[in-house]
Image: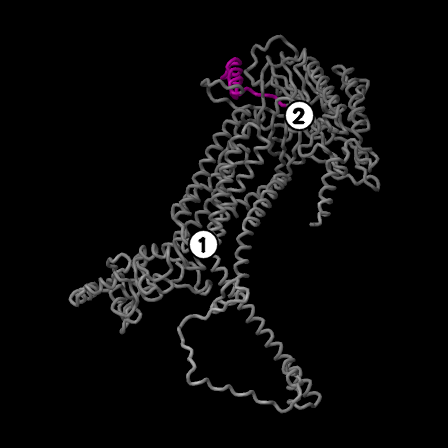
Amino acid sequence: MADRRGVLIPLLIIGWIFFSPDPSRQSAARFEQRPSVDDVIAEEERSLWALRNSSYGDFNSPLGNVLNLTGLEDDRGYAWDSLLKVQERARERLQYALGDAGTRVLEGGDGDEGVPALYSNVTGYVHGQWVRSKLQDSLHVPQLNLSSYAPMGPFGALDTGPFGRNITGTEGDVRIHFHERTPYDADPVTGAANMTGISVEMVLQDLHSGDEVELQLYGVYDMQIGQAVMTTTSNKMAGVFMLPHFTLSQHTFDSAKAILNQSITQAIRGQKAGSLSLLNPWTSSVESNVPAAFDAPQCELILYLQQLPPSGSRTAAFSSDMLGFLEREMRFPTGAFLPSAPEMRFSMLAFSPDCGYVLESKGEPDFVPQDGEHLSGPKIEVLQNSGRHHLLFFAVTIGGQLALLMRQMREASTPSTRSRISFYSIAILALGDGFAAMTFLIIGLSVSGLWINLTATAFLAFGSVLFFGMRFLMDIWTAQAPERAVRAREEAEQERQRQDRFHATLERLRAERLQRQAADAGTPASQATTVAQTPADVDAASQPVGPVEAAPAPQPLPATAQRPTDTGATPVFMPSDQEGLVDTQTGTGTQTTTAFEGRSTSLGSIYIRFYLVLLVTIYLSLSAAAWPAGLRRAYFTILALIYLSFWVPQINRNVQRNCRKALTLEFMLGQSVLRLVPFAYFYAYEHNILFAERQPYILLALAAWLWIQVVVLASQELIGPRWFIRKDWAPPAYDYHPVLREDEEGATMPLGLSEATSGSAPTSPLVERRASFSSPTARRGSIAKEAKGKGKRVYDCAICFQDLEVPVIEAGGSSEATLAGGLLARRNYMVTPCRHIFHSACLEGWMKYRLQCPICRETLPPL
């Protein structure tokens, strides 16, 4: 019975994972890195009580900190005295975007007459550029007690490094993803019908340092005036609890307070019930909701976003009713014909009270439109619709790649044609399809609106890899197995010769050393030579010497005995167990079995190596998504350069084997064009789904590199596989298109069908019958035809039985004219090592199925 005790270890690990206690419910005694969830709930209830009992204006009360919220303590040193200037700047943004009507609605005026048409649902993406605000010069510099922010380690407080999310540059890029509501919003609140909860994922990139900051913010959005106020929340600032005090009027304060009371209460109920196990439901971390024990503190951020009219001016091209109908049709389509939805436009104002910086979006009125137009981007419905179209186009591209691959597989259907194709070129193409499929599946897990389209495209890419790409790789690997076996034998023979030379040198040095020792000691050279004998000689010499009996001579056979006859058959030996026949000419059975098992093992390892490389590439790419912008851009550019070098292995194989026409022209051109499509989409298309920055110069460099490979492949087929390298850089190979030179005896000239049949070379019955019908007169006519043109000779092809005219350099003539004008003419004929000449198309078609000369059946080297 098999020993199954090893199963206990995986079971114990799985049980420990599933039944281990929740770390958020554990005691805070371990390094004092974070409080338990019960302590967090108690602090949240206290902050909620402070929020409910606060009034508009308490934040800047002359009595000081009357809110009693975390982050407002006097010893914190935050720049709260600059908040009034930031709010005034936000009012200016509102005034510029909506005019006096927007200011009137902000203060609680009735109706929204005069307010331009704005989007009510702003779910989508916007991106643009940011710069340092003018308020930066007059901003109070925070004076922080950094020792109070030092995280506790096992041996006390750790050194405090630079704060995270600290923007030090003067300009950069920003990208914001709007979510319609926060995860903890309930039904619409009475008295706040025009305000809703909102959350965003924000990415700030500093062009000066190259750092990239990614964070989440939660807040409220006023649909009447298109203004969003958001903040971060952490253990050093209760941002969401003081958010209503960041609003710009009493009216917005009351609405935000009503919404936050309800959403915070719902979140606390979830924590108590256990359905919400987060220590901070409003965490600003995007990657992980559980903070690490020794993370450096992060800069807090207060964000004001003001929606601008979609038309780009105060005179709206869309009325409020028309824009509302367009918005409902995009969200719940009924098939109505509508104009294109305009992009969302926002101005941004970001303020950090603890790190002391203010950022603004780059646009009017401080900058001309050529320098920046604030933040703009599509709504999520428009983005998903364009994403479906782009995925459909990419699916068509993958279908084209698959069709070209199938045609190439049909063309390379014999071992001779498969042996010309580089295994690594096809493997790189298959890896590209596998990478695309895995990427689509990963994106589909997080993008719900495009899940079906992404999965369908991923399935098509996986089908191209699993059912066609891997099959083609296996066929190529099997066809090239004899070549690898020959190369392995050559390497083994070289290793054996190297070891023999090493042992011979070692024996020579040992003999010389013994001779020198004998010369120093005065020992005769004959004794030193005796000492240097091999162990076998010493053992033989140590045997006792005595008379040796001669072996008895064999008796002659009787005269009537039958003598053995030589039948010419190859002797075959059968082992005693009769489990196989071993030909004495092919070696032992152990060597044959070992070679077969080695090939089988190598064939089975293709899948492991292929998918291992694919998974490692996917893992590195996912990790690179969190790297700094410069390093991430360099990684993906290098990865693209490696991927678009898929013709380099084929060029190398053409050189090594001196072969042409390994791949069809349509396969090379089609794959080169189709493989560039994704890179053109991300590097040149401005409205790509990932909002990648346009980099046309990188695209031009990648395209130039790919088409250089295509040109080299075409030149190898036209001029020769080795025209750009020296002869000693590659192993010797036979040239099927030699320059024909006539000598005195004609010993170097090729033989056509007539010359071959006149000799003793074996031919087919059809050839022999055709030769028997040819008369001496016809033979003389053929010879006269050959001598008719100067520098030309006509042969008859044994495959198509048609005449073949070839250029010939006469004896003593110069080859410069032939080499200059006869390059293409040399591609019309092929000469075998046995000196038989054929049409190139005829012999190439023949060699697809058989590597034998059609006339003499001599083995031909691969083409």
Q: Is residue 310 magenta?
A: yes
Q: Label 1, secondary structure: give it.
A: helix
Residue, x 63% and y 79% (percent of image)? 509
Residue, x 50% and y 14% (percent of image)? 322
Q: Residues within 10 Å of mark 2 (few under 14, many from 20)?
A: many
Outermost residue, top direction? Answer: 110
Q: Residues within 10 Å of mark 1 (few under 14, many from 20)?
A: many
- Where residue 126 sits in the image (x, y, percent)? 57, 27
Q: CA distance from mark 1 to mark 2?
A: 56 Å
The disc at residue 303 is: 2
Q: Give yes or no for contact between labels 1 and 2 (Cβ–Cβ under 8 Å).
A: no
Residue, x 41% and y 50% (percent of image)? 412
- Relative depth, front residue between 253 and 579: 579
Pointer 1 or 2: first along the chain: 2
Along the horizontal axis of the image, is 641 left or right of 72?
Answer: left
- Relative depth, front residue between 818 and 162: 818
Task: Tell me the amino acid under the disc marked 2.
Answer: Leu
Q: Is residue 475 magenta?
A: no
Q: Is residue 701 visible?
A: no
Above or below 155: residue 100: above
Query: Can you tell which quarter of the image residue 25 is in?
Result: top right
Read off the magenta span: 305-330
Outermost residue, front direction? Answer: 560
Task: Tell me the amino acid under the disc marked 1.
Answer: Ile
The disc at residue 651 is: 1
- Where residue 437 sits in the image (x, y, percent)? 53, 39
Along the horizontal axis of the image, is 830 left or right of 12?
Answer: left
